[in-house]
């Protein structure tokens, strides 16, 4: 079922810079969708449309099949359902402490104090930063700030979480922590849409990928199919994911079956190699046994 549906979205920034040019994209409920493309392709602009931060000059956006409205009350309800996490958390965090920042959204919804406190506690626990509740924002690392920004959105209990370059600038340890947080949310039923330049992340972590070029979606498919198409990747100024390159070479060398499903993770690649090596080991063992028994 489609939860967000952009149809013919067109948007131009001041100075006649066309960012979206009749873009069509449907987001399915419960999926993880990666938005891929070069700088200036319209990825961030689309994300800002998905929660009403920007309004298209043409086209329509549907939320649960209903056309969205842009009055104050409608926007508040919309943003409670579709939470946006910006690439730079400093653009989103403004309060003195972690608790104060995460509580802002629920308080702005007019919830009772007891409900606000409960939601903040749950959000901080969800992203594993309960111990940081009283920490001043300026004393946090980039990874911690990004988790605070996510917690602030989660406290509003959205059904869709939209993230712009969520892993950019993070070290591998922080990336692993962030992806674990997002995996828990996905497993709980949250729809996740994220923009990224990381094709390897998109392959491993997405149900579908949407390839962007010149303000339009040029392909939207399972990642192992969309990112295997060399022509599409060239249009989107992307490289093929490393695992798909390795799998192709391994197939050419006869190390994995030609009909094997494309691997999306290192574990899947290892399983394919192990599966292919078992018959080889058996064959070598049989040959050795026959050699010992003329």
Image: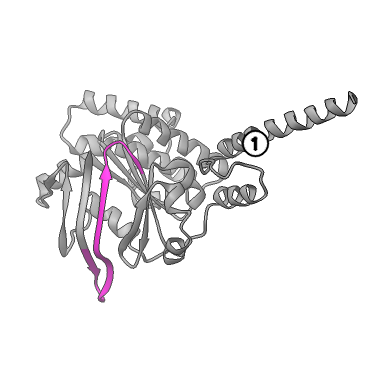
Q: Residue at x 64, y 47 (%)?
A: 250
Percent across and percent down for residue 212 are 36, 60
Rendered-image quadrant of the N terminus: top left
Question: Would you place residue 30 above or below residue 33 in this image?
Answer: above
Residue 104 in magenta? no
Q: Is residue 287 left or right of residue 209?
A: right
The answer to whether one can see residue 140 in this image is: no
Residue 117, image quadrant = top left
- Is any part of residue 65 visible from this angle? yes
- Viewport quadrant of the C terminus: top right
Residue 13: say if magenta: yes
Question: Residue at the location (46% across, 58% down)?
Answer: 229
Residue 181 image-quadrant placement: top left
Report crowding for label 1: few under 14, some 14 to 19, many 20 or more residues within 10 A (C-alpha). Answer: some
Q: Residue furthest bottom?
A: 15
Predominant SS of the magenta segment: strand
Magenta residues (range): 10-32
Which of the two residues, 57 or 231, is positioned nearer the viewer here? 231
- The residue furthest front is 294
Q: Nearer the viewer, residue 162 or 2?
A: 2
Left or right of residue 126, residue 273 in this image = right
The residue that label 1 is drawn on is 276
Residue 17, horizontal then vertical, whole percent: 28, 73
Q: Position of residue 19 (x, y in %)?
A: 29, 67
Disc count in the image?
1
At mark 1, the secondary structure is helix
């Amino acid at each position: 079922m489609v939860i967000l549906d952009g149809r013919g979205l067109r948007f131009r920034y001041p100075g006649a810079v066309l960012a979206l040019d009749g873009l069509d994209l449907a987001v399915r409920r419960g999926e993880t969708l990666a938005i891929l493309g070069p700088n200036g392709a319209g990825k961030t602009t689309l994300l800002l449309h998905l929660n009403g931060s920007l309004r298209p000059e043409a086209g329509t956006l549907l939320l649960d099949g209903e056309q969205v409205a842009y009055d104050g009350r409608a926007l508040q309800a919309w943003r409670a359902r579709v939470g946006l996490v910006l690439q730079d958390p400093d653009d989103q965090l403004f309060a003195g402490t972690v608790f104060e920042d995460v509580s802002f959204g629920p308080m702005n919804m007019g919830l009772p104090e007891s409900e606000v406190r409960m939601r903040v506690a749950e959000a901080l626990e969800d992203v594993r930063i309960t111990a940081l509740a009283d920490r001043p924002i300026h004393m946090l690392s980039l990874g911690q700030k990004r988790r605070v920004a996510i917690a602030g959105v989660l406290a509003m209990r959205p059904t869709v979480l939209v993230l712009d370059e969520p892993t950019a600038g993070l070290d591998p340890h922080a990336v692993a922590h962030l992806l674990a947080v997002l995996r828990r949310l996905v497993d709980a039923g949250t729809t996740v849409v994220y923009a990224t330049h990381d094709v390897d992340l998109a392959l491993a972590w997405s149900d579908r990928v949407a390839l962007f070029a010149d303000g339009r979606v040029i392909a939207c498919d399972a990642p192992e199919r969309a990112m295997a198409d060399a022509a599409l990747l060239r249009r989107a100024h992307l490289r093929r994911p490393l695992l798909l390159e390795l799998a192709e070479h391994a197939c050419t060398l006869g190390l994995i079956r030609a009909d094997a499903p494309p691997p999306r993770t290192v574990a899947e690649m290892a399983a394919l190699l192990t599966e292919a090596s078992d018959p080889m080991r058996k064959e070598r063992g049989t040959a050795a046994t026959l050699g010992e028994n003329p």
